[in-house]
Amino acid sequence: MINCLNVSLQEMRDSGNEQIKTEAISICDKVGIKSELKIKRTIKRKVMSGENSSGEDISADQFLTLEYYKVLDNMMAQMKWRFEQLSNIAVDFQFLSAHSLSVTPVE
């Protein structure tokens, strides 16, 4: 079940977010909400000597895409980590299963 969820998240990441954006824009149009994405202010970062200006100004659409991928990557990493931790706990407490209790000799 967790592997299926991980596969679904990976497919969402691979397919991109264009379909999701299109669906969100259509919902906004139905409800009457402006679907324009605007960045209200840009974050100014101090440029140190010897550093080139990297032109970090990105559009709101690009920012949304970056955040979308960050969220999906974080979800997949957390799911993998939690699944591994729960698997380790299950192995540690496997001796309490009904099968192992029934076949373990009593001394």
Image (tube, rainbow, N blue to C red):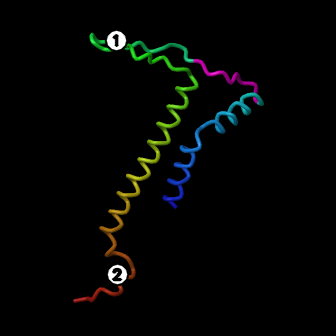
Q: Residue at x 34, y 75 (%)?
A: 96
**Image location of residue 69, percent across then percent down:** 50, 37
Range shown magenta:
31-38
Q: Residue at x 27, y 12 (%)?
A: 50
Instruction: Find numbered disc 2 in the image and state the secondary structure of the residue it sits on.
Output: helix
Q: Residue at x 38, y 60 (%)?
A: 86
Name the residue furthest right.
30
Q: Residue at x 49, y 38 (%)?
A: 71
Instruction: Find numbered disc 1 in the image and state the secondary structure of the residue it sits on.
Output: loop
The dominant secondary structure in magenta is loop
Q: State which quadrant residue 29 falls in.
A: top right
51 sits to left or right of 29: left
Residue type, numbered disc 2: Ser
Instruction: Choose the circle earlier in sequence order: 1 or 2.
Output: 1
Residue annotated with mark 2:
100
88 sits to left or right of 17: left
In this rendering, the answer to whether 11 lies above or below 35 is below
Q: Quadrant of the C terminus?
A: bottom left
Res. 71 mark: none
Q: Nearer the viewer, residue 81 or 104?
A: 81
Q: Nearer the viewer, residue 78 or 46?
A: 46
10 Å crowding of disc 1: few (<14), some (14-19), many (20+)? few
> Between tags 1 and 2, which lies in front?
1
**Image location of residue 79, percent across then percent down:** 44, 51
Queried whether the magenta region covers residue 33, the answer comes back as yes
Q: State which quadrant residue 49 falls in.
A: top left
Residue annotated with mark 1:
46
Name the residue furthest left.
107
Residue type, numbered disc 1: Lys
10 Å crowding of disc 2: few (<14), some (14-19), many (20+)? few
